[in-house]
């Protein structure tokens, strides 16, 4: 039996998760909710995706635009085994009572607090602990990126402590009204930023302090990591450790991928839909080891990095497979990751 998945909120993350579900052999997309009948609704309908109004009050908007909806969120939840909440940050938590009333498993995104589900997920770090759970939060794009590289380093060498500077994109490409447009904003100005404590929701034993800045770019985030390992590690050993994980992609400035815009150009040249790069990108030349201390610079495509993690979370919660390795392999193959 395939797992039937509902998506509440069909924006940046929601439409990507929807497309990824359509590629899974063991899942079906029951439908998605929309607040208004814009062009995204028409495109979704043309792909055969069922549209539901996010609430009964909004059905009139769709009727007026002569767009056929299959019902409301409540109707959609009856057609599904699990809902992926992709509503804007802090809105998702308000749906918790709705999902609980409908007795449906729910996944939230990183814009919600850990407490919304009581469990924060990353495919490589804690798949097995998510098995059969009713509520899970997939951590944010930045936290997902940090979990991927830190897990690999910790497994191979052990991490004594890590210090991270995050340079965050000011907004997603379509967000005209957000900024900054001519500023570098310490965001927050206090230390630590929330990212370190968020990593510890997934990897509680990691000593991590983070500080973050928002800058006028929309393409990707960049992180500078300074990590103290429990033992000496050569650069060769560090690359070997990363090579075990198809969701980590090593790129080289010497080969022409020396900036976030060049990473995005690379994604375009790979033929990636929407120029998505769900893999964590690490610059080869930035990996520098000084015995037990090391540095690296990594880039996170915020719009897509959490998509494969949502697919694995669905598999764990509905027990499609008990093995995280099997799930991540299936997700990677179906989404063409690691190639
Ligand atoms: P978004 O604004 O692009 O999309 C949200 C969608 O939900 C929109 O289609 C909006 O119309 C719809 N919506 C608004 N209110 C709603 C409601 N009450 N009921 C149903 N739908 C509603 O947001 P996003 O960037 O996709 O973010 C979704 C979640 O994913 C947030 O928690 C966010 O923090 C997290 N996240 C975002 C990014 C990113 O870079 N965009 C990365 C990782 C995680």
Image (tube, rainbow, N blue to C red):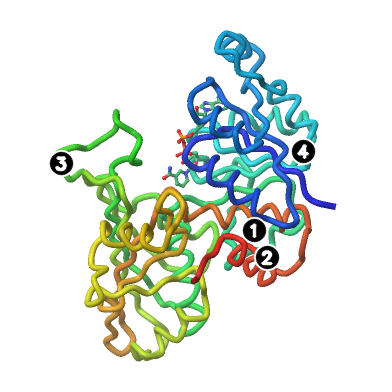
Tell me the crowding category of disc 3: few under 14, some 14 to 19, or many 20 or more residues within 10 angstroms, Cα based: few
Mark 2 and mark 4: Cα distance apart in space: 20 Å
| Whole-percent x, y for residue 221 in the image | 32, 54
Look at the numbered discs 2 and 4 and tell me whether their residues touch, using CB distance below 8 Å.
Answer: no
Query: Label 3 near label 1: C-beta < 8 Å?
Result: no
- The alpha-carbon separation of the residues under discs 1 and 3 comes to 37 Å
At a point 38% along the width and 66% down the height, the residue shown is 281
Report whether the residue tagged 1 is closer than 8 Å to ligand 1. no
Mark closer to the observer (2, 3) = 2
Mark 4 or mark 3, which is nearer to you? 4
- Of labels 2 and 3, earlier in sequence is 3
* Numbered circle sitting on residue 327: 2
Q: Is residue 27 above or below residue 85?
A: below
Mark 4 crowdedness (10 Å alpha carbons): few <14, some 14-19, many ≥20: some
**Image location (x, y in percent) of residue 123:** 60, 63
The residue nearer to you, when weighing 264 against 137, is 264
Residue placed under numbered mark 1 in the picture: 312
- Picture quadrant of residue 251: bottom left
Residue at the spot 51% in from the left edge and 53% down from the top edge: 306
Counting residues from the start of the chain, the first of labels 2 and 1 encountered is: 1
Badge 2 vs badge 1, beta-carbon distance below 8 Å: yes
- CA distance separating discs 4 and 3: 45 Å
Eye-nearest disc, 1 or 3:
1
Direction from residue 318 to residue 275 in the image, left or right: left
In 3D space, how far apart are the residues under numbered discs 2 and 1 (Cα atoms)?
6 Å
Instruction: Of the two numbered discs 4 and 3 on the same chain, state the one appearing first in sequence.
Output: 4
39 w.r.t. 203: above or below: above
Return the mark for residue 183: 3
The mark that comes first in sequence, 1 or 4, is: 4
Q: Which residue is mark 4?
A: 80
């Amino acid at each position: 039996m395939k797992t039937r998945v509902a998506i509440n909120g069909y924006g940046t993350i929601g439409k990507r998760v929807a497309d990824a579900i359509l590629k899974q052999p063991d899942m079906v997309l029951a439908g998605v909710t929309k607040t208004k009948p814009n062009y995204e609704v028409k495109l979704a309908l043309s792909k055969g995706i069922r549209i539901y109004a996010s609430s009964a009050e909004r059905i009139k908007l769709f009727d007026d635009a002569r767009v056929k909806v299959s019902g409301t969120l409540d109707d959609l939840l009856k057609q599904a085994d699990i809902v992926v909440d992709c509503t804007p940050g802090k809105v998702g938590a308000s749906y918790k009572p709705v999902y609980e009333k409908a007795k449906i498993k729910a996944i939230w995104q990183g814009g919600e607090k850990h407490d919304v589900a009581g469990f924060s997920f990353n495919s490589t770090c804690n798949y097995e602990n998510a098995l059969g759970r009713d509520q899970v939060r997939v951590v944010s794009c930045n936290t997902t990126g940090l979990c991927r590289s830190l897990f690999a380093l910790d497994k191979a060498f052990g991490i004594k402590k890590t210090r991270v500077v995050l340079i965050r994109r000011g907004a997603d490409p379509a967000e005209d009204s957000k900024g900054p447009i001519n500023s570098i904003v310490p965001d927050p100005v206090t230390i630590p930023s929330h990212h370190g404590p968020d990593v510890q929701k997934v990897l509680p034993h990691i000593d991590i302090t983070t500080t973050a800045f928002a800058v006028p770019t929309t393409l990707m985030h960049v992180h500078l990591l300074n990590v103290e390992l429990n033992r000496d590690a050569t650069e060769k050993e560090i690359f070997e450790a990363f090579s075990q994980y198809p969701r980590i992609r090593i790129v080289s400035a010497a080969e022409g991928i020396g900036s976030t815009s060049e990473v995005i150009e690379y994604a375009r040249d790979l033929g990636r839909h929407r120029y998505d790069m769900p893999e964590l990108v690490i610059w080869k030349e930035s990996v520098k080891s000084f015995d037990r201390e090391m540095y690296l610079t990594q880039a996170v495509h915020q719009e897509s990095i959490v998509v494969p993690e949502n697919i694995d979370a669905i598999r764990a919660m509905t027990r499609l497979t008990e093995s995280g390795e099997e799930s991540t392999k299936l997700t990677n193959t179906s989404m063409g990751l690691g190639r």
